[in-house]
């Protein structure tokens, strides 16, 4: 599986990234300057209430290789065109990334699952040459410029297999980049950013948070939604692509990379003992090198040493909602 390097140590990054745009005609305004950049809790507050997946990563370096977990970390950059990751941002350092996504659905034919979402990236050193080149290349490649909730956004279009992706990239303040795959989601993020609304996405009283350590180098949370019948990555629906793993009582999951143990893990949460047994059987067929155990009734953990190159990363992408149809 792909690992991103964090200040000399390996970091596994699960960053769901996505962005879109709105419209309007306004005068150009200078990016906001503030004494302190937004922190994790503030970035989580910006996410819309119906966000289903959140992915967070800290202090990692963009790696030019790999197509599994790094594709989650740099999802909108990848779909905008792989040259941005490999030619422009390779080696750039990210201090913090927070991404949210919703409404997962299959591609038209093959390739990446579609979704709506937005990811905030805080560079370690915004003045670093790679980030400057990225900003310049975005402006040059944009097919149009739009205004979303009073903020300028550059729209890049790229076709992946049969799907046209419209990636909006915005620089609303110094040291902050927003990337999105959906205009409505981006508008909600910016409106929440500009307001004092309390946090609404994935509240802390959900059971998933009991099984997640925010001190992990990278982590993700998904709370399943039964409203999206198009979602092929959810065990709630019998017509999914996860094989025999159909659990109508599944609640959600957490994923993480524990740098101290150099271990990647996923924890599935359900109210059904039968569902827990099904997910164990699913992993046993795919990940012979991993350790599978029960943490609590209905809670199953699968862990793999970080150095293992395996199908684990692609499976995590699917469970988070960013599966690849081959």
Image: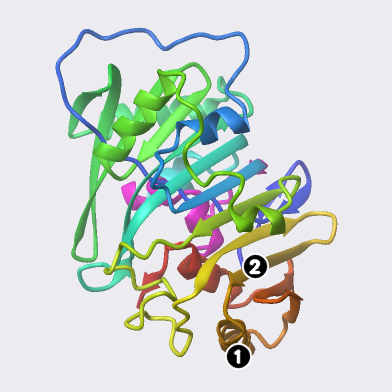
Identify the colour scheme used.
rainbow
Helix, strand or loop status at disc 1: helix
Q: Which residues are magenta?
A: 59-81
Label placed on residue 266: 2
Q: Is residue 179 left or right of residue 182?
A: right
Along the line of sight, which residue is nearer the eye, 184 or 126? 184
Q: Quadrant of residue 254?
A: bottom right
Q: Is residue 198 left or right of residue 23?
A: right
Q: Quadrant of residue 229?
A: bottom left
Along the line of sight, which residue is nearer the eye, 32 or 200? 200
Q: Looking at the rendering, in which quadrant would you find the C terminus?
A: bottom left
Q: Looking at the rendering, in which quadrant would you find the N terminus?
A: bottom right
For image coordinates 55% across by 68% down, the residue present is 316
Q: Is residue 112 left or right of residue 27?
A: right
For image coordinates 60% across by 32% down, the residue present is 41
Instruction: Evaluate whether residue 149 shows in this view.
Output: yes
Pointer 1 residue? 281
**Image location (x, y in percent) of residue 216:** 74, 50
**Image location (x, y in percent) of residue 82:** 39, 52
Going from the N terminus, do you reach mark 1 or mark 2 first? 2
Along the line of sight, which residue is nearer the eye, 13 or 321? 321
Helix, strand or loop status at disc 2: strand
């Amino acid at each position: 599986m792909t690992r991103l390097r964090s200040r000399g140590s390996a970091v596994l990054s699960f960053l769901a990234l996505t962005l879109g745009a709105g419209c309007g005609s306004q005068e150009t305004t200078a990016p906001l300057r503030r004494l302190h950049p937004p922190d994790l809790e503030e970035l989580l507050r910006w996410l819309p209430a119906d966000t289903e997946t959140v992915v967070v990563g800290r202090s990692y370096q963009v790696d030019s290789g790999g197509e599994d977990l790094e594709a989650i970390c740099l999802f909108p950059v990848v779909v905008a065109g792989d040259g941005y990751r490999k030619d422009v941002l390779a080696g750039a350092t990210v201090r913090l990334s927070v991404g949210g996504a919703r409404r997962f659905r299959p591609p038209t034919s093959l390739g990446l699952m579609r979704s709506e979402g937005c990811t905030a990236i805080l560079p370690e050193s915004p003045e670093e040459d790679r980030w400057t080149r990225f900003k310049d290349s975005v402006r040059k490649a944009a097919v149009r410029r739009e205004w979303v909730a009073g903020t300028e956004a550059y729209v890049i279009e790229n076709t992946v297999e049969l799907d046209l992706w419209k990636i909006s990239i915005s620089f609303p303040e110094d040291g902050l980049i927003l990337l999105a795959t959906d205009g409505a989601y981006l508008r909600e993020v910016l409106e929440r950013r500009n307001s004092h609304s309390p946090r609404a996405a994935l509240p802390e009283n959900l059971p998933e948070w009991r099984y997640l350590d925010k001190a992990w180098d990278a982590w993700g949370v998904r709370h399943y939604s039964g409203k999206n019948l198009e979602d092929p990555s959810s065990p709630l629906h019998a017509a999914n692509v996860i094989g025999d793993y159909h659990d109508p009582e599944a609640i959600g999951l957490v994923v993480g990379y524990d740098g101290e143990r150099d271990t990647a893990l996923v924890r599935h949460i359900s109210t059904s003992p039968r569902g827990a047994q099904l997910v164990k059987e699913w992993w046993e067929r795919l990940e012979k090198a991993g350790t599978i155990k029960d943490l609590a009734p209905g809670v199953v953990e699968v862990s793999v040493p970080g150095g293992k190159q395996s199908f684990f990363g692609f499976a995590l992408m699917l469970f988070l909602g960013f599966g690849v149809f081959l």
